[in-house]
Image (tube, coloured by chain):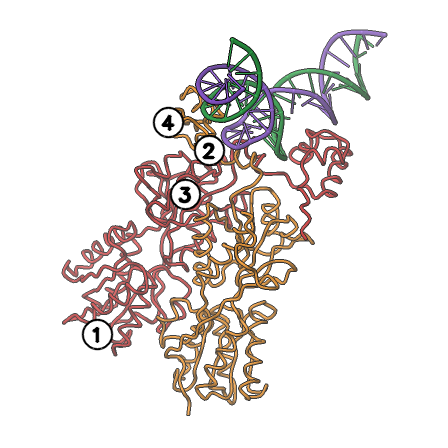
Chain colours: A red, B orange, C green, D purple
Amino acid sequence: MSEPRRAPKIGDVAVAAGVSVATVSRALSAPEKLKPETREKVMVAVAALGYTPNSVARQLRAGHSSLVLVIVPRRTNPPFFAEVLHGIDSTLAAAGYVLITGYMEGAEHDLRLIELAASGHVAGLLTISGDLPKVAGRSILDAGLPAVAICADPGVEGLPAVLLDDERAAAMQVEHLAALGHRRLFYVSGPPGNYNEVTRHRGIVAAIERAGLGREALIEYPGNYTFTGGVAGAKAYLGLADRPTGVICGNDETAIAFVKTVRAAGLDIPDDLSVIGFDGIELADFCEPTLSTIAQPRFDLGARGARLLIDRLDGNATAEAMPAGGRIMMQGTLLARDSTRRID
Amino acid sequence: MSEPRRAPKIGDVAVAAGVSVATVSRALSAPEKLKPETREKVMVAVAALGYTPNSVARQLRAGHSSLVLVIVPRRTNPPFFAEVLHGIDSTLAAAGYVLITGYMEGAEHDLRLIELAASGHVAGLLTISGDLPKVAGRSILDAGLPAVAICADPGVEGLPAVLLDDERAAAMQVEHLAALGHRRLFYVSGPPGNYNEVTRHRGIVAAIERAGLGREALIEYPGNYTFTGGVAGAKAYLGLADRPTGVICGNDETAIAFVKTVRAAGLDIPDDLSVIGFDGIELADFCEPTLSTIAQPRFDLGARGARLLIDRLDGNATAEAMPAGGRIMMQGTLLARDSTRRID
DNA sequence: AGCATTGATGTAATCGATTACAGAAGCCGT
DNA sequence: ACGGCTTCTGTAATCGATTACATCAATGCT
C-alpha cells in the first residue's frame, strides 16, 4: 500500500550530487560559500530526491529548538483565546518558530507540560493563563526557559508580561455607566482570586470612589467568566429587593447569559437596566441587544507577547525598550452599543 | 540574573552515581534489568541533579517522535473547533503524545506546515480542516506520515476519517422543520465547495424530496459559516417577496446572526419563522430565543480521530475494526429549542 | 576443579545534521 | 619556480541518548 520510502538523508543527497555531506549542508545553509555550479549540482539532487533536512538532528547539533510552548487554560472563553493564539502564531511563524499548545488540565496532568519544558524540545514559553503548571513543588519555570506572560500576570519575579491595563479598563466600565446616570451598580465578577478579576475589581472600586458613588453603591456576585456564571448572577440580581440599574460583567459570555436571563424574566435592556461586558468578542455585536463592552486588543496582545519572547530567544534583548517592571500595558477600548443607555 | 545552569546530561548523572551512562539509561527505561541497589543509586543522582532526558537526542536515536501536528483552519468557528481540539489533546496526552497546532493561512504561508511535516519532527498528522496544505504541487501528505482526517473529508484515497454523518444530520434539520409544518425552506449554506457544505446540501435536498416538498420548496443563499454570512443571508431573506417560514443555517454562528438581523427588522421568531442551526455550541443555548440545532459530538470526534491515529502510530492497527472505506461515522443529535415551532 | 551459563554493567557504535580544521587547487608576485 | 594567499571542498568530531556487543564475576553442573 504505502511504500515505506525512507526519507532521504544528507548522505543520499551527497552521493547523488557527487559531493560530500559538508558541501550539501553548506549549499542549504550558507550558499555563498560555494562555487555556483557546485551549489547548483546539489540543489538539483535535493530537488530530485525531495530532501528535507531532519530538524531533530539539526536541533540536537545546534543545541536550540524552534518550538514555543504556549500554556492555554482549558475550556474557557474560546472566542477570546483563539484570537490571542492567532496573534501569537502569526508572529512566531514569521520568525520561523512553531507553536505547541499545552492545555492546562490541572493537578497531576500538568506534569507532562513541565516535563516537556525540561526536555530540551522547547525554546521558550508563553503563558496566557494566569496560573502556571506547578506539580508537587515543581514549577514549569524551573526548566529555566525564556518565558513571557500574556493577558494575565502570574506574579513571578522577573517574568516579563504583556498585559491589558485591566484596572483602567474596568474603571472605564464604571465610568461609562456613571456617565449615563447610573448610581448603583451590580457586578458579576470573574473567579475570585483570578489575576484579571483581582485587578479589575481594584479598578472598579477606585472608579466608584472617584465618581463619588460610595462603596455601598456596588453589589457583587462571584462569577466565573462563563455562561453559567452569567445565569447565576442574573438570578441573584433578580432576587434583589432594590435592583441597581447598571450591571458590569466580567466578560462578554457572562454578560450575554446575564442579558438573556433577565430578559426572560420580563425586564428590558436597556430600558430597565444597562449591561456592559468585557473582551469585545465578535459575538457581542451579534446578540440582542448588541452588547456594550470593553474591547481588548486580542490579536496584538498575542503578537506583542510573542515578539518579546522572540527577541529574547534571538538575543536582541533590547530590540524594544522594556518598561520598568518588565510589563507592557495595552489599553482597552470602550464600545458603547445598545445594551447601555442614559437613565433618568 | 538567570544563572545559565546548563541542563544536566546523562553523563553527569553517571558520574554522580558512579556508574556508566548505559546504566543510567537503563535505570530510566528498563529498570528491571538492573540490580535494585544500582537503580536506587541512579535514581538518587537523577533526583539530586534534576535530570530530565533530552528528548531531542532520544528522538533522533529512536527515529520517531511523539509530536502530532493538527491542521486547524484559521479564524473559523472557535467555539466548535476548540472543543474538538480538547478531545484530541486529551486523547493524545493520555497516550504520551504532544499536540502541535498548525493554523492554515493559505497560499505560500502553508509551506512551513509542509516542511514541518517532512522535517522528522512529527510522528503523525491530524486535520480538522477540509483543505490540506498544498503549495506548488507539494502536498503535506507527501511526507508519508500516518494521517487521519476529522470532521471533514479531504477526499484523499486511503486517508481514514472520523466524520459526522453530515448528510443524515442535515436531513434532520429538514425533517424537524417539515414535521412542524413548514413547507418552504430558506437555506443559508456554508462556503460553496466546502466538504461539509456539499455533503449537507445533499442531505437537505434528499430530505426535501422524501418529505414530498418538491425541489422548488428550497431557496438557497451562499453563506460562509460566520456571523457576517448570517447577516447577509438574513438581508437576502428579508428582500424576498414571499418568505419561506423555515430557515436552515449552516452553523450556529450563522443562525445567531440571522436571528438577530431578522428580529431587528421586526419579525418574530418563532412566530413568523423558525430557524435551526448546526453544531450545538454552548452559546446556542444562551441566545434569545434559544436556538434549535443539531449538536455534533465535538469532543468525541476529536478523541476518536486521535485514537485512530495513535493506534496506527503504535502499531495496533486493528485495535479497532475500521469500517469499509476507512471512515467512522458519528451521528448528530437534534436539540429542539425555542427558535423552531409548529406553524399553522 | 574446569567449563558453561546467567546476570549485571561497561564500551563504543549509532541516529542525521553542522562545522572546526585540514587539505587541495589556483593565483599572485618576485 | 616557489612560498604565501585565497577559495573551495572534504574528513571527522560533535550534539545527548539508546543499545548491540563485550566483559567480568558469580554460580551451577559434571
Q: Which residue is mark 4?
A: B40
Are discs 2 and 1 located on one and the same chain?
A: no
The numbered mark, 1 or 3, whose residue comes first in the sequence reads 3
- Disc on res. A344: 1
| Cα–Cα gap, marks 3 and 2 | 23 Å
Q: Which residue is mark 2?
A: B30
Marks 4 and 1: CB-CB under 8 Å? no
The secondary element bearing badge 3 is classed as helix
Q: Nearer the viewer, residue B242 or A247?
A: B242
Circle 4 packing at 10 Å, graded few (<14), some (14-19), many (20+), is some
Marks 1 and 3: CB-CB under 8 Å? no
| Cα–Cα gap, marks 1 and 3 | 54 Å
| Cα–Cα gap, marks 4 and 3 | 26 Å
Q: Which residue is mark 3?
A: A113
Return the chain for callout 1: A
Q: Depth-wise, is mark 3 or mark 2 nearer the camera?
A: 2
Which of the image's four quarters has the C terminus of chain A?
A: bottom left
The image quadrant that residue A216 belongs to is bottom left
Kind of residue at disc 2: Ala
Return the chain for callout 2: B
